[in-house]
Amino acid sequence: MGPESVNLRDGAQTGQTAPPPDPSDGLALSRPEPNEFNWVFFGPRGLRAGWSIFLFAMVLYFTLDFFQWVLWFLVVEVAHLRVYYGTALNTLLLEGQRVAALLTTWMIVAALERRRLADYNLGGSRRLRLLLGGVAAGFGAVSVLILVLREGGWLHFGPGGLSGPQVVKYALLWGLAFLLVGIFEEGAFRCYLLATLERGLNFWWALALVGGTCVYLEIFPGAHGAWGVYAAALAGVVPCAWAAWRKTPRCGLWQAAWASSVGFGMIHTFNPGENWMGVLAAAFIGFIFCVSVGVTGSAWWAIGCHAAWDWSESYFYGTADSGFAARGHLLTTTPSGSALWSGGSDGPEGSVLVFPVILLLMFALIAIYARRKPAVFSQKNEDALV
């Protein structure tokens, strides 16, 4: 429990009124007058982060079920379509359902918390520029990785997979499909989750969340590449503990980035064909996307980079993408040699060579955006997670 929670409780016991939220804070949430129990649910910045995430998860769970039912009815009962795994249509429908559920959940939770959608790392005045910059960065990073794998003999190109109008057709279909992927995954992890955890997470709560994620993977076996999650969890302990001890600026952001990135790696363990290197890479690039929020002030660069990364692997170069093999791709490639270098069934991001590429991506991100007007973040961890 954070110090301010004790102060609020003490204030309630002594009859004092807790100070109101700063009106200039876009995340401020009006709340009832404090009493003996309000401190459990409310902090200085409104509903506590733990309750916010619980509310978000519950609403998202039910909206996903609702839109899945709607989609199934429209596609199977009304349109009589047959949808196959790995096709652009299947991905469009699946991700469209998820994005619809996410947007609905955002609006419901934002209304209940009296926040704006922009408060979930979606603000800023350079949205389109950041989105396109992320697209260029994602395609460039994958191209560098593919080139290195090809020159090292760990990836071979075969005959092209498409010709004529099919090239444009599948480029657009997969482009839209992976844009939806980027919106859903970044919207969940780098928008809502990161923004909410940042305002309510200290080191010990971050450690508890990360530890709980690892325990979950142990209790429920069958995950692919779980050691990648364990490695990501261990990698963040010392830096986050040091940041908390030194009370560094944006400490809450780094604690939130650690917890959300480990969670991002965890969801990739459910993909068939994943290996531990690919899961670790997913957590690593998830952290880079958190860094992008820190230096740009929003998640738009991350959305563009995520979408372009997946599009480049799956459609343009025709490689596996976290174990997913797309039907209808421009080029055809085949991994060769040890999976440690080629990535094997995971795809290029399962190769050990992906890590220097991700580091290069981070350096380019910082070099381009960090010198501009800094993003506005809370400089202290004000809301204890309940």
Image (cartoon, rainbow, N blue to C red):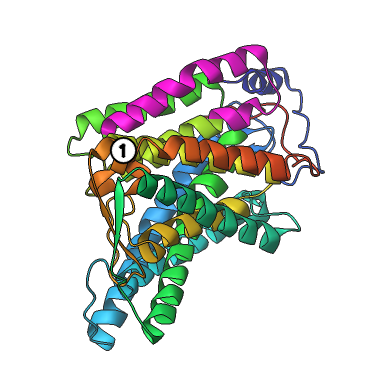
Residue at the far top: name it: 245
Q: Quadrant of residue 31?
A: top right
> As drawn, is 173 to the left or to the right of 79?
right
For the point 40% across and 86% down, the residue is: 165
Figure quadrant of residue 84: bottom left
**Quadrant into which the N terminus falls:** top right
Residue 170 vertical position relative to residue 288 in the rendered view, above or below = below
Tell me: residue 31, above or below residue 74. above
Closer to the camera in the image, 196 or 339: 339
Q: Secondary structure at mark 1?
A: helix
- Indicate yes or no whether the magenta region holds residue 9: no
Highlighted magenta segment, given as a residue range:
226-255
Residue in the foreground of this view, choosing between 162 and 225: 162
Residue type (three-letter) at the residue carrying disc 1: Trp
Residue 269 drawn at (x, y percent): 28, 41
- Magenta stretch mostly in which secondary structure? helix
Residue 135 position (above or below residue 20): below
Q: Residue furthest left?
A: 222
Write down the residue under mark 1.
341
Please name the residue shown 74% across and 28% down the image: 18
- From the viewer's perspective, is residue 50 above or below residue 119? above
